[in-house]
Image: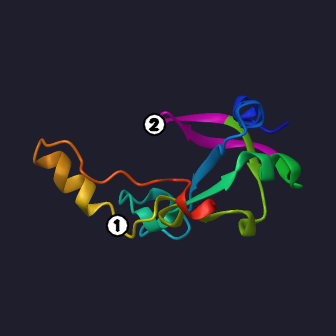
């Protein structure tokens, strides 16, 4: 069973894109124990594509809401995932971070469906 089943139902019912994101810790400096959170290490895939794709399921340790837990982990072919920056249409989060530091409302909101049309 694909864990985010609610997302699959929501995508089918609303006919809108719903995505599953993963952090590719193997790309990140420091690997699994690294503390740097870089945009280029995040990937996304359509929950519909993941539901239909073959995958392996195993029990293992993962972080859920920042807490390490023993959970069911799904493993898919990495070719199903694309860089999250592509979906957002940005190469860096710096403008958004700087805007937050300046306590102003962001003037740039990425359009997640622009590149999907």
Look at 24% across and 47% down and name the residue there: 106
Label 2 CA crowd tier, 10 Å (few <14, some 14–19, many 20+): few
The residue that disc 2 covers is 66
Q: With 7 as the anchor, is 84 left or right in this view?
A: left
Which span is picked out in magenta?
58-70
The residue that disc 1 covers is 92
- Which percent across, then down, holds residue 8? 76, 36
Q: Is residue 15 magenta?
A: no
Pick whichever, 42 or 9, lies toward us.
9
- Which percent across, then down, holds residue 82? 62, 66
Q: With 94 as the anchor, is 27 left or right in this view?
A: right
> Residue 95's image quarter?
bottom left
Q: In this picture, is 19 found above or below 3?
A: below
Image quarter where the N terminus lies is top right
Element under label 1?
A: loop
Mark linked to residue 62: none
């Amino acid at each position: 069973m694909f864990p985010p089943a609610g997302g699959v139902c929501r995508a089918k019912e609303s006919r809108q894109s719903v995505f599953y994101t993963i952090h590719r810790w193997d790309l990140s400096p420091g690997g699994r124990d690294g503390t740097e959170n870089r945009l280029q290490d995040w990937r996304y895939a359509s929950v519909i594509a993941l539901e239909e794709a073959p995958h392996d399921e195993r029990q293992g340790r993962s972080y859920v809401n920042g807490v390490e837990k023993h959970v069911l982990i799904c493993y898919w072919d990495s070719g199903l995932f694309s860089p999250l920056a592509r979906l957002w249409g940005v190469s860096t989060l710096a403008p958004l971070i700087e805007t937050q530091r300046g306590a102003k409302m962001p003037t740039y909101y990425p359009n997640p469906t622009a590149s999907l049309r």
